[in-house]
Image (cartoon, rainbow, N blue to C red):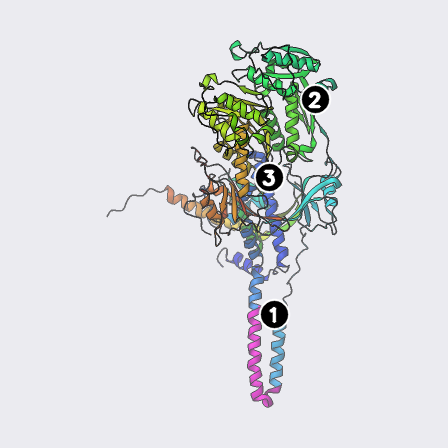
Amino acid sequence: MFPGVHESLSLAIRRFLSPPEHRPKHEIEAEIREEIEFHLAMTTERIVQEERLDSEQAKSEALHRFGDPDTITRECTRIALKERIMLQRINTALIALVAIGLVIFGVSTLQQQARTNAAFEQINEKLTGLASSQTEIPPVASEPERAQPEPVVYVEKYDGSGADSVPFTEGMTVAVALRAALGDSSPVPVEQLRVNVVRWTDQNEEIVVLRDVPATTDFELRPLHSIVVTGTSVKLPWVLYSPSADDQTALETAASRMFIAGSEFGDEVTVENIFERCAEELGLALEIDTDDLHESEHSLSRPVSTEFAETLTLAEAMDFACHIAVYVNFNKLLWDIHEGTLIVGPAQAIAERALVTSTYRVDELLGPFPTPQDRQDLRETIQMMVGFDHWREYGGDFGIYTEIDSRISITTIPGYHRSITSILQSLRDPQQQYPRVWIQDKYYDRISEKVILGRIDEQLTAKTPIIEAIQSSLEGFGLPRFIAFTELESIGFKSSRPIGRKPSVSATLTNHLDGWLRQASPNDYDRAHWMAYGGGIIISSAASLDSITTTRTYDLSALELTSDHDFVDSIVDLIQTRVDHDGWRDKGGSTGIISAFRNLLVIQTAEAHHRAIFALLDEYRSKNSIGATSSSPDRVVYISGGVQNPGVYQLALDSTMTVRQLIEAAGGYTIQPDSAQIAVTRTYADTGASRTWNFGPKHHDISMPLEPGMSVAISGEPPRQPGEPAPFQSQDLTTANTP
Amino acid sequence: MPPSKDQPSPPERPDILRGTLDMMILKVLTAGPAHGYEVMQRIARASEEVILLEEGSLYPALHRIQKRGLVRSEWHRSASNRRARYYELTDAGRKRLEADVNTWSRMSQAVDSVLGSRFTAPEA
């Protein structure tokens, strides 16, 4: 015998004699899936450790390296069942032969019944015996008993630690599973948590079974259900900065008592007079320290107005005085109240007298299981929005930020503590502080009402100087008389120029103000603008008005069904491209700052830019309302993340557009195409439930047809080739984006 | 579905000669039972990261050689306390490995001989 032939023959005989796989197909498949899941989990862990990716990215990368688990599962199942499939085919063929044989013999029987009775019965018995032996194929030898996959459910905390599996038991409830997974690690009793219950289909589709329900629900879990903790039903500890009782009283008085100049200052009130008067009213000592400001940068003796208004509170008057006292806004003047003293000066001067350490407990804001990303975003939001230049860790002079669990310890000046408190409150409850309906400055609302000048037109003629026309029209409407004209000399503003023609009675006051200011300005580049600020109206240069910033929080959940980082980033890009293009600090500008915390954007910029941002988001929202669903009459779809032009796209009535075509319509990928992870989400109007289809890099050519209301989110790696990323193209979302 | 034309080609990996994958799996299992992930790691380590398997291709190969009786498998707890399917070499697998290694050595020597020879271009 030739070498090897004996071995090959013995293998062939062994294979021929080996028992066919007799377990149900779904059991075999389940085992193979579990085996592959184990492999992916191990690879994910290794990538997290070695490549420092977060768990989601690592999971995606592991999947990328592995290939399509479904295809591999099918291939392994086919191998496992190969003999059985072949035997089934042979079996079927034999039964068919038997049946044909029976027919033939039946015919023969009719023809030769008399002669062949005995023979027929003999043959028939043989054939029946053959058929029954092929119908049931007993295992040749019993295999050793194998361990079956244990049924499990998963518990996910969304804190970046991944999902914990818990052995499934019949009748298991959410609370039981949570107790088993979390033990004592939950900051509140598990019954007080709120959860989503999710299940995954074989096609890796996520189906939300229960949305945001208390953990006490009596819903009975099934194997492979996932419980995702979303929050708590109870209020977690929440402690913010609180000044001393006396300082708090003084602050409340400053915010509520009206400023009355009195006669002691004569006809002219200076900036210094305002602070003196306020300190007196509040019963506080006054310390003004402008040593850190260059003489040319400020003037405390600057006159404000002979008619300095009694329409302002003490706090508003001091805010206003701080602003107009400083010529160059690199170093702002601030006021603060600390231990019975009203302190006025730049931040560093206040810090020399009043540096306060306060501990903030933000458990409720961060939720029961905060992610490292949440903590980082919160830190950045606070440090960017408040005292940007003063944090010690970035080379500043006094601000210190430290964190332990859900406690934040901050050392800074009292006024900054108050600002931080305000931001944290807006983040915790954006609906209350900045609802989805835009709250404008109360004075701006009145000015911009659709009122016409009809009832005061008698007072204004073509020869009325512009400055008088402005004062007259504002006063005529009972609007605050406190009007400050600042920084107008530097731009050559001609306030005595006549308005030229009698105002139209059909125009609004806003239209007239804008028109007159344009008329008195030398050109469009050096134009004077107006803004409502702290109860007064400031008319000044654009640069000066831009330096008066306010901080607002925008809730992006009103815009998009999902709030992933890519979507938030695309909205930030949209804002920075369309509003105050050159002003954003992270783009080399000097005023605007944007920071994101989950699906909230905190933006610090001039009020005029806030208005433009709101209008932009409102425009986006009108095309992409939160209620957009499969029954949306708008027939729009949304795409966000790694494409050139994310946004809203209109579907034609008879559209057969696919996901791939939408990606192309949006200008194609800005990410590495072979790393693209695509999530298509559809929300159902009746139940509010949503369903997500996830596609990996191997499915980039997605032919899935789109339906109105669907959202497509693209993520992936940045392009491998170094070079400039494609710029975001300014576009009109209502028209230009429509493919 | 075929990839579109604008897709870049995948990064190059050293190709594994057809048939050698089974032999390598059998070889690394001589060190003791291992789950699929460990098999892949052993091959990568032994080859000093030169041979990086297409991870998905490993499992059909494992199931194929199990079907041929060269390995058997059982479920056990892994070091991370998760259930994992461990593969173990059978006697038939050891014999097959021995035969395959002999064949491979002969072929390898033969290829080396061809590559090490000096040839002159035949005259036209």
Give the residues drawn in magenta, as a range: A91-117
Q: Secondary structure at mark 1?
A: helix
Q: Nearer the viewer, mark 2 or mark 1?
A: 2
Between B95 and A661, which is closer to the camera in this rendering? A661
Tell me the kind of residue under disc 3: Ser
Q: Secondary structure at mark 3?
A: helix
How packed mark 3 is, by other alpha carbons closer than 10 Å (few <14, some 14-19, many 20 or more), is some
Q: Which of the two labelled residues, at mark 2 and mark 1, occupies the earlier sequence position? A: 1
Between A577 and A458, which is closer to the camera in this rendering? A458
Q: Nearer the viewer, mark 3 or mark 2?
A: 2
* Mark 2 and mark 1 residues within 8 Å of each other at the beta carbon: no
Q: Secondary structure at mark 2?
A: helix
Disc number at residue A252? Answer: 2
Q: At which x and y percent is residue B67?
A: 57, 55
Residue occupying image coordinates x 56% and y 35%: A53
Q: At which x and y percent is residue A539?
A: 52, 22
Q: Seen from this angle, which residue lies furthest bottom?
A: A114
Alpha carbon separation for disc pair 1 and 3 = 63 Å
Q: Seen from this angle, which residue lies furthest left?
A: B124
Q: To which residue does mark 1 refer?
A: A134
Residue A487 lies left or right of residue A254; in this view the side is: left
Tell me the kind of residue under disc 2: Glu
Q: To which residue does mark 3 refer?
A: A557
**Does residue A679 show up magenta in the picture?**
no
Tell me the kind of residue under disc 1: Gln
Q: At which x and y percent is residue A654?
A: 48, 54
**Does residue A106 show up magenta in the picture?**
yes
